[in-house]
């Protein structure tokens, strides 16, 4: 069973850049493009090692792919970098894959990026510079624009961030993605957060420290198609809202107050029309409409409460976020050909 490992201790202090950088790459059915991405990452790693003396490892996390992504990752060469390949026992979702990478990264700082090639490896040098040269603890990236997306999607994304940031003490930057670098002390803070239902973007913002935004242009996918459809995006949005924010509950309270106010004003209007003007008020249509509106709102609010109760149940069960089927490690420095045998964790 793959439980959360305790926070790692290293010979380097948590704030020592010499602890190195782990690049965590969650992947799901990305076998065709993984070798090309790896070659680009190795090129960047060589440059960083030559210019900054920064030790680097790449941690590939196969989230239960069905196209051999795990086998491809395990066979990638350890040229100038250490390579970890972790295969989860099934598809647990991207948040679980990110957590697996966080748990098993061996170096102090961690950079997270997707395995589909849309996060440009060439930008890593900029992120590292913002960390080492400018002293930022969280260097996150965001899409420079959404001109290639539909009007409806842009508005829905904007509404999501407005709602999740409603009344929040720590705002989540709009358009920020999972492509970000965390300093050693930011990684230590993130590892201390115990919740199982996780929203990585929110947690990385919530920990605080010095944070800075870097805009980028996402590259087109070189292979395959995205696995994120409308249903998956809606589910991710609901999980993010209910695991990180109480804004939906506050909206429910506001709606309840609003409907109570409307009902009170409507009652006053009926009294005035009946007592002062002697008018008969049509009861049946107004009664049916009121009952349907209030019933619909109540059902929606019950559904919102159900989402939060489900999150509480998941936390109380205490199930692991993931299980590891295989894990391998190739070390570039000690022995370029050495490889720890793949093993299933108990």
Image (cartoon, rainbow, N blue to C red):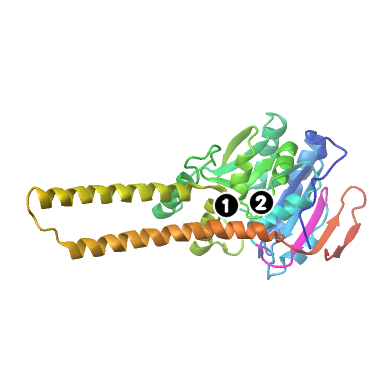
Residue 90 painted magenta: yes
Q: Identify the secondary structure beneath mark 1.
A: helix
The residue singled out by tag 2 in the image is: 195
For the N terminus, the quadrant is: bottom right
Measured along the vertical axis of the image, is residue 250 above or below residue 128?
below
| Magenta region, residue range | 79-92
Quarter of the image containing the C terminus? bottom right
The numbered disc on residue 338 is none
**Residue at (82%, 45%) from the top-left corner?**
8
Q: Secondary structure at mark 2?
A: loop
Q: Nearer the viewer, residue 145 or 306?
A: 306
Please indicate whether residue 23 sits to the left or right of residue 298 in the image. right
Cβ atoms at labels 1 and 2 below 8 Å apart:
yes
Q: Which residue is mark 1?
A: 243
Query: For the residue carrying disc 2, how many other residues have a C-alpha within 10 Å: few (<14), some (14-19), or many (20+)?
Result: few
Q: Position of residue 343 (x, y in %)?
A: 85, 65
Front-lying residue, 76 or 306:
306
> Horizontally, is 337 left or right of 53 in the view?
right
Residue 146 visible at all? no
Q: Gap between marks 1 and 2, in whole Å?
A: 9 Å
Pick the front one: 211 or 331: 211
């Amino acid at each position: 069973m793959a439980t959360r490992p305790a926070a790692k201790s290293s010979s380097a202090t948590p704030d020592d850049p010499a602890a190195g950088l782990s690049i965590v790459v969650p992947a799901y059915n990305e076998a065709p493009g993984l070798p090309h991405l790896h070659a680009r990452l190795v090129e960047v790693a060589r440059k960083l090692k030559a210019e900054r003396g920064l030790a680097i490892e790449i941690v590939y996390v196969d989230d239960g792919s069905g196209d051999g992504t795990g086998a491809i990752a395990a066979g990638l060469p350890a040229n100038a970098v250490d390579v970890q390949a972790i295969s989860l026992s099934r598809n647990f979702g991207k948040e679980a894959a990110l957590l697996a990478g966080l748990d098993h990264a061996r170096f102090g700082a961690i950079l997270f990026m997707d395995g589909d090639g849309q996060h440009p490896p060439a930008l890593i040098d900029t992120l590292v510079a913002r960390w080492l040269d400018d002293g930022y603890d969280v260097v996150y990236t965001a899409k420079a624009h959404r001109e290639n997306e539909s009007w409806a999607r842009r508005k829905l994304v904007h509404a999501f961030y407005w709602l999740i940031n409603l009344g929040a003490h720590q705002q989540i930057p709009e358009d920020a993605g999972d492509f970000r670098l965390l300093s050693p002390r930011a990684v230590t803070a993130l590892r201390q957060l115990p919740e199982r239902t996780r929203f990585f973007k929110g947690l990385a913002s919530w920990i605080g420290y010095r944070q800075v935004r870097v805009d980028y242009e996402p590259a087109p996918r070189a292979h395959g198609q995205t696995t994120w459809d409308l249903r998956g995006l809606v589910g991710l949005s609901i999980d993010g809202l209910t695991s990180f924010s109480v804004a939906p509950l506050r909206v429910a309270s506001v709606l309840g107050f609003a409907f109570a106010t409307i009902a009170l004003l409507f009652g006053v209007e009926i009294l005035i029309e009946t007592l002062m003007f002697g008018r008969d008020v049509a009861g049946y249509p107004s009664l049916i409409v009121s009952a349907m509106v209030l019933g619909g709102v109540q059902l929606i609010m019950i559904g919102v409460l159900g989402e939060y109760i489900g999150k509480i149940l998941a936390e109380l069960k205490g199930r692991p976020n993931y299980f590891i089927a295989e894990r391998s490690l190739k070390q570039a420095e000690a022995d370029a050909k050495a490889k720890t045998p793949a093993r299933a964790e108990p």
